[in-house]
Amino acid sequence: MSNANETTVRNAYAVAERKDMEGWINAFTPDGVFTDNSIGVSYRGRDLDYPVRNYGTAFSNMHRELYHVYSAGNVVVVQLALQGTNDGPLQTPFGELPATGKKMDAPCCDVFEIEGGKIKRFDCYPEGSIIFAQLGVLTNLGAALRR
């Protein structure tokens, strides 16, 4: 069963890489939930595509480099890196971050709960502070705080 669950997760990443929003939504159970733990926001239903769409807009070459995949029962844990060049606006809880032209290569850990070949729960733990530092946001914030 864990091989099938790992395949489900790998397929979901492939769908996200293609920016197939309908395919992404359909990868989830009807009551499935996606939580971005870097900002404490959960997505359900038609909103499940928002994080994939948002990052796909901000990083047209968005890539998820999978390093390690661990399966145990109905849980799959993935260590990965989020990679891409910030060439579009990124929506954040603090407002829109305009394109910086800078590259992102940030660690992330994803935890999936699989039910019936679909994602029931997806907890994403991207390293937001590294992402913002690589995009120059923290440098700008630090300069503003020193004023």
Image (cartoon, grey):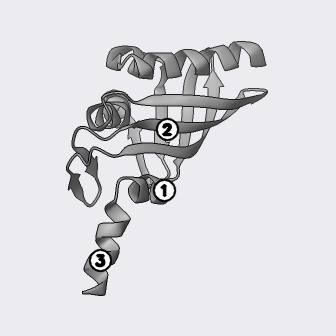
How many residues crowd mark 1 within 10 Å: few (<14), some (14–19), many (20+)? some
Which of the 4 image quadrants contains residue 7?
top right
Residue type highlighted by circle 1? Ile
Q: Amino acid at mark 3?
A: Ala
Q: In x, y percent, where is residue 28?
A: 48, 23
Which quadrant of the figure contains the N terminus? top right
Circle 3/circle 1 CB separation < 8 Å:
no
Q: Which residue is mark 2?
A: 82
Asked which secondary structure carries label 2, the reply is strand
Towards the viewer: 63 or 126: 63
SS for dot 1 = helix
10 Å neighbourhood of mark 2: few (<14), some, or many (≥20)? some
Check disc 3 and report the residue beneath it: 143
43 lies above or below 18: below
Q: Which one is nearer the viewer's eye here, 108 or 106?
A: 106
In the picture, the disc for residue 116 is none
Sequence-wise, which precedes: disc 1 or disc 2? 2
Q: Is residue 126 left or right of residue 146?
A: right
Residue 130 got which mark? 1
Is label 1 in contact with label 2 (beta carbons under 8 Å)?
Answer: no
Say whether disc 3 or disc 1 marks the residue closer to the N-terminus. 1
Report the front residue among 29 and 17: 17
Q: Is residue 10 above or below residue 85?
A: above
Residue type at tag 2: Leu
- Residue 8: x and y, percent? 61, 16
